[in-house]
Amino acid sequence: MAYIDGYLVPVPAGNKDAYFALAAKAALVFKDHGAIRVVECWGDSVPDGKVTDFKRAVKAEGDENVVFSWVEWPDKATRDTGMAKAMEDPRMQGGEMPFDGQRMIFGGFVAVLDE
């Protein structure tokens, strides 16, 4: 079953184009190292919750929007090898991040339902 790396990122509205340019470059690297699919989603209908919500999860401030994204791998073994290679890939080095990486949330997930 597929393995998913999921991400939630606070991105200033003014950095939207820069973020997606960076994401497109990263997507190529992930796919070159075994990823099947990369999806990036700009928050459009992200309501405020009573206890928690997407914005509070990343401590979104002012004009920041939430990006929800994931990288799909065929399995965890491919992900572990591919992610290690992607992080060492020169294309992933340097450059300015168009968001505060300290507030990014990420994790790996085993897919249990795919309809």
Image (cartoon, rainbow, N blue to C red):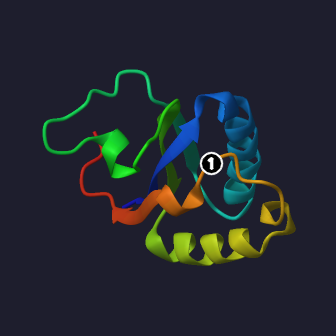
**Residue 60 or residue 34, whichever sits in front:** 60
Q: Quadrant of residue 88?
A: bottom right
Q: Is residue 87 above or below residue 3?
A: below
Q: Is residue 39 above or below residue 48?
A: below
SS for dot 1: loop
Q: Residue at left 41%, top 64%?
A: 107
Q: Position of residue 57 (x, y in %)?
A: 33, 50
Pointer 1 local density, CA inside 10 Å: few below 14, some 14–19, many at least 20 = some
**Residue 61 or residue 115, whichever sits in front:** 61
Q: Position of residue 35 (x, y in %)?
A: 60, 57
Quarter in which the C terminus is drawn: top left
Residue carrying label 1: 99
Q: With 11 as the anchor, is 103 left or right in this view?
A: left
Q: Residue at left 72%, top 30%?
A: 17
Q: With 2 as the anchor, is 73 left or right in this view?
A: right
Quarter in which the N terminus is drawn: bottom left
Q: Residue at left 50%, top 44%?
A: 10
**Residue 38 or residue 94, whichever sits in front:** 94
Taking the view exactly as shown, the residue that stands out farthest to the top is 45
Q: With 77 as the anchor, is 59 left or right in this view?
A: left
Q: Is residue 84 above or below residue 99?
A: below
Q: Position of residue 22 (x, y in %)?
A: 74, 45
Count the numbered circles shown. 1
Q: Residue at left 72%, top 42%?
A: 24
Taking the view exactly as shown, the residue that stands out farthest to the front is 62
Taking the view exactly as shown, the residue that stands out farthest to the left is 50
Q: Is residue 15 above or below residue 26?
A: above
Q: Amino acid at mark 1?
A: Phe
**Residue 23 or residue 50, whichever sits in front:** 50
